Amino acid sequence: MRLTKAELFALLEEKYHQYNHTSFIESDPVSVPHMFTRKQDIEISAFLSATIAWGNRKSIVTNAHRLVKLMGTSPYEFLVNAKPEDFKPFLLFVHRTFNGDDCLFFLTSLQQIYRAHQSLEHLFNTLNDHGAAHAINRFREKFLETEHLSRSEKHIANPLTGSSAKRLNMFLRWMVRKDDRGVDFGIWSSLDPANLVCPLDVHVGRVARGLGLLHRTQNDWKAALELTDMLRTFNREDPVKYDFALFGLGMFEK
């Protein structure tokens, strides 16, 4: 038996408040950027943590902390001042298929970006006018300007080829959404949370289909848009707030 729209709204709101709470932070990759207060340190640690956010959740958090700690007390200061030899320890880093070569490329690309710009925010500034797919692809093109192995490109999702871009959408949620709950940062004030796309993974997709919020069977970009459009009917200004509800129901309540 399907829930009515009013019942769905009540459920989503209840679970949003339950899981969008500081107690959620410790066991989530978002715990890594929460170690910092400087905008650039938050961005860098959040981006790298989101990049490796697939697989076993405990392993993700452990490896993300390990990766960021290799950069000392300030990822930003490390990157802008690092010499080539300073990157050598990162060649030993591995998280699933993300290996040392990938890590070195990501750090080198971030270094070049931060030596030229104060923030990653401006690379996503087409989000408001052209949508998330355009903004993510624009960032991706800039990021891939740094010399790299072709294998590394799979770690930067491309919604224009159908990827749900779950990890980049999660990163954007962290950076753009701002409320009084203490989980998301909301440090990119120029971007509108109304234009974000819900991070779609196997847990969110399963729950969304069970609740009748998503009908497309593939977890791809079209499905992410379909789900987000449905969530906008409950909150047009902040649809991805319900990522907390869907993820919590799928991960913690099965």
Image (cartoon, rainbow, N blue to C red):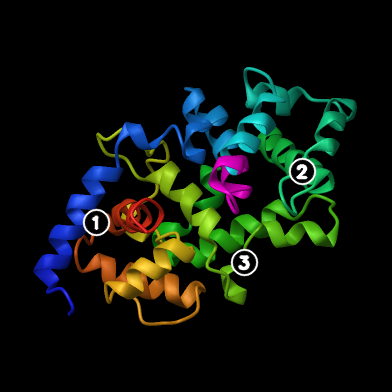
Q: Which residue is mark 3?
A: 158
Q: Which amino acid, by three-letter code, is at mark 3?
A: Asn
Mark 1: few/some/many CA within 10 Å (<14, 14-19, 20+)? some
Q: Which residue is mark 2?
A: 94
Note whether 54 is above or below 9 in the view shown. above
Compare marks 2 and 1 and give the one earlier in the sequence: 2
Q: Which amino acid, by three-letter code, is at mark 2?
A: Val
Note whether 51 is above or below 29 in the view shown. below
Between label 2 and label 1, give the one nearer the viewer: 2
Provide the secondary structure element on which disc 1 rests. Answer: loop
> Which region is colored magenta?
47-59
Mark 3: few/some/many CA within 10 Å (<14, 14-19, 20+)? many
Q: Which amino acid, by three-letter code, is at mark 1?
A: Glu
Q: Which residue is mark 1?
A: 237
Provide the secondary structure element on which disc 3 rests. Answer: loop
Compare marks 2 and 3 and give the one earlier in the sequence: 2
Position in image of residue 228 (x %, y %): 34, 67
